[in-house]
Structures are given as C-alpha cells and as structure tokens.
Image: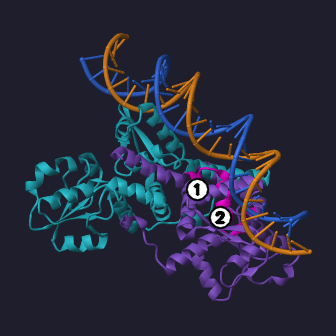
Chain colours: A cyan, B purple, C orange, D blue
Amino acid sequence: MSLSEAKSALFEAIAMMGKAFASPVRLELLDLLAQAPRTVDELARASGQSTANTSQHLQALYAAGMVTRAREGTSIRYALAGKEALSLWLALRDASVARLAEVERAAHDYLGPEVDTIGREELIARMRAGEIVLIDVRPREEFEAGHIDGARSIPLAELEARLAELPVDREIVAYCRGPFCAYAHQAVRTLNATGRRAQRLQEGWPEWQLARRRAAKPAQRAASRTPRT
Amino acid sequence: MSLSEAKSALFEAIAMMGKAFASPVRLELLDLLAQAPRTVDELARASGQSTANTSQHLQALYAAGMVTRAREGTSIRYALAGKEALSLWLALRDASVARLAEVERAAHDYLGPEVDTIGREELIARMRAGEIVLIDVRPREEFEAGHIDGARSIPLAELEARLAELPVDREIVAYCRGPFCAYAHQAVRTLNATGRRAQRLQEGWPEWQLARRRAAKPAQRAASRTPRT
DNA sequence: CAAGTTATCAAGTGATCTATTGAATAGCAA
DNA sequence: TTGCTATTCAATAGATCACTTGATAACTTG
C-alpha cells in the first residue's frame, strides 16, 4: 500500500464515523438514545420513521461505532456506545449552536418564549439547602433509565393532573432531555400559570450524566495514547 | 410551523455541520488547517485535489461554520473557525480511534513500526531540567504559524543534511502534526540510525495548542448557555 | 409445530453528493 | 486598458444515500 493510499484510507475510516452525523434522522436517534436505551420499534415510533428505515439508520450508527446493541428476547435494544459517543454528540450539538445561526433560529421556533433558568452549581447549592423541589418531566421510562439524584418523576403529560403534589410556596425546578427539549419549557409555563415559582434547569439529563461520569473518571484523551499494532 | 417540523428543522441544522465530517477529503483539509491557515491553492496541492474541488469542499466547510476565510490580495486564506472547530475535529478523530478498529489498522499501515514515545507532562518536566532537545519536524511554514515553546524547526526533509546540529549525547524529542502524522516517526528512526537517543512526542501541535488554550481560558460548554431570541 | 412479533435484508426509485470540466470573476501589475 | 493569477461558478456524469415495499430470519408463545 502506497503512502498516499494509506493516508486516504485513514481519513476514509474517520469519515465513516463522521457520516453518522450527516443525517437528521440519525441525529434524532442519537438524541433519543442519549436519554435511554431503546428497541428499534420504540425508536421508530418516537422518531416517526418506518421500522425498516430506522433499522437501517441504526445499523449505520452501529457500523460507525456510535451505538451498541443487544438482543432482548424478540427485540433488539440499542444504546449509545459509551462516554465517547455521548460526549461527541453533545460536542457537535454545542458547536453547531455556537456556530450556526440557523440552529438558534430553529431552536427558538421549537421551544417558544424563553423561561427563567437555573445553572448546575446553583441548583446543587439550593437543593442542598432544601429550597428547591426538582422534577423530571420526561416520560417515565427515561426517568427510570437514569435521572438526577433527588428528582421526582412527573412526566409532562401528567403535570396538570398532579399539580396538587407540588407546593405553592417553594421554588420548583424542571428539567428534561436537554436544552433543545421543549418539555421543561412547557412545564415551567404551566407551573407559572398556577401561581408557582418555577425555573428550567439549563441542561438536561445527558449533560448532567456526562459531567458526573467525567468527574468520576477524568477523561483520558485518546489522542495522547499511542496507536498500537 | 408545526412542532414536528420545527424539531426536524433543528436536527437538519445540526446535520449541516455533521456533513462537514462525512467526506475524507474535507477531513484532510481540516487536518491541514489544524496546522496552519492556508490558501485554496496550497490546500489543493497539499491534499492532491483539483483547485475547483478543494474550493467546493472549503465552501462546504465554511457553510458548516468550521472554517473562516479572508482575502489576501489575489488569494483567499482559510483557517479553522476557533477553538470549538479544532476541538470538535480532535474529538471526532479520537473517538474514531477509540471505536473503530479500521482506523487503528489504517494508522498502523501508514505510520509503520512504532517508536519510543514521551508524554506531555514528562516532556515539560525534562525540558525544564534541560535534558532534552525538542525539534519540530513539520514544514517550515507550519512551524512559523505556531509551535511549542523551546522547539527548533528542523523539517524532516532537511533532517539528514542537518544532523550535525544535533547532539549525540542528549535525548532528542521530535513532534509533528499529531498522532497520525508520519514525520515524527521517520525522524526518530533516522536519529536512532545515527546512534542518537530519540523519542516521539505522543501528541502534535494542534493538541498541544488546544490544551494551552483550554488552560488559558477554560472551556465554557455551549450546552449550558441558554438559546436566546 | 404453527402463529405472531420484531428486526433485518434486498431491490428499486428519486434525491443528494462528488469530482471533473470549462467558463466567469476579482484582484494585481504593467 | 491588457494580461496574469487565484478563486469561484455552472453544468454534468457517476456514485452514494434515503426511504419505500415486500420478503426473510430470529425469537416467543400457545
């Protein structure tokens, strides 16, 4: 193999992974998988794609090394492939927000008017002081797959029916899937409409989880490792 | 705009940036730009593509927000668009090494047998102790666009002719463009062949530079910022 | 084993992407 | 102005990709 052939083979191999991020459908699947592992059928319904198409995109993601899969009886459950995959997806999403005005515009159309927000450190401090009720407004199965310690699960769909469970005299903080998820926005609006003080956590479960994992076991940059035979 | 339309518009906007990483040619251009800003013609020659093709790929990268461009007289100089772009490219490259066996294989074919390496911290410590001669074996213009403090520029092409400049009784460390760049490997082999002790720095200039920039001004995650109107 | 569910495969069509070619444009220099 | 260089634009053919449809395979349950 000539030197230039080897070089282009290297970039082609990296492009294989890059292609995973080139389709909006695959990105939506990644976004869903960042919440919780899911079966093909669940992903197909959640993303509004046909089962066959979803399966094909998932195989592309698998070939790119972005997801793992495991058979569970008659169905197959896909999950994000480790911390690197999560961190890569979040990095791309953040970079595109930083760079592309269109993403901001699309995000704004989707999310509606902005609501009060609270950051990670402030949330931790005020939760420790007992000043805050934290609610997770994602669907129940995502809560069960992982959530912030101390949060209560009140899926957005149940919020109105369960308002009585929530105090009127304490601050409520809602979080959901991430900065592009509309659930927490809507929850805060609903809570405000009933006279409660409410804020949206600036980040979602994937970001929280990644921060926790990074703190537990600091990132080791693959670049500084030596490629071996 | 319906909610599901808005949602897919969001993922489409992010996919615009993802597409930047879907072509080996564009990745090679990013890799070159991670060393130094360059004109279209320089990039075309360095990557072995036609000028027109290079120009089109550069425009795709520009649309994706990955590069900036500035006219310089009759030519146009492209550069990586900030820290985020560099960090995203390095993250993708690292993740693909971590996940895809093919990248390792391609890298090994390209780089040839492994040589002794040294890490960042050890290099810093031993340079401070004066035990090491550090050489930058990239082409001169890349050295001039930025290099590690204390390094001497000895492009690989000139190494054999300039061997006399290098001591026989001190350890020599060579670095180049990064872990997939063959220059430092070859330099170490050449130096070893002349009886000198030599090692390859595990990382290259882009990684070094990013670490320095991150230390100077710690990364602020875009995710935790609030999208605004 | 047969029936039912879940996922994958295979083939086909329309869309998008890539690289090439040749023409057009922007700046520079005489 | 005329030439000259660097870059972009426009048109094109070939390759790849996305999504659909219908068939097939893997597994569970009765």
* Residues packed near mark 2 inside 10 Å, few (<14), some (14 to 19) or many (20 plus): many
The residue that label 1 is drawn on is B97
Residue D28 vs residue A81: left or right? Answer: left
In the picture, which quadrant includes the C terminus of chain B?
A: bottom left
Residue ranking furthest to the bottom: B129
Q: Is residue B86 visible?
A: yes
- Three-letter amino acid code of the residue under disc 2: Pro
A43 magenta-colored = no
Residue located at (80% from left, 82% from top): B168
Q: Magenta residues?
A: B19-40
* Residues packed near mark 1 inside 10 Å, few (<14), some (14 to 19) or many (20 plus): many
Count of residue discs? 2
Residue A41 vs residue B83: left or right? Answer: left
| Labelled pair 2, 1 in contact (Cβ < 8 Å) | yes
- Which structural element holds mark 1? helix
Mark nearer the N terminus (2 vs 1): 1
The residue that label 2 is drawn on is B179
The reply to the same-chain question for discs 2 and 1 is yes
- Which structural element holds mark 2? loop
Provide the chain ID for the residue under circle 1.
Answer: B
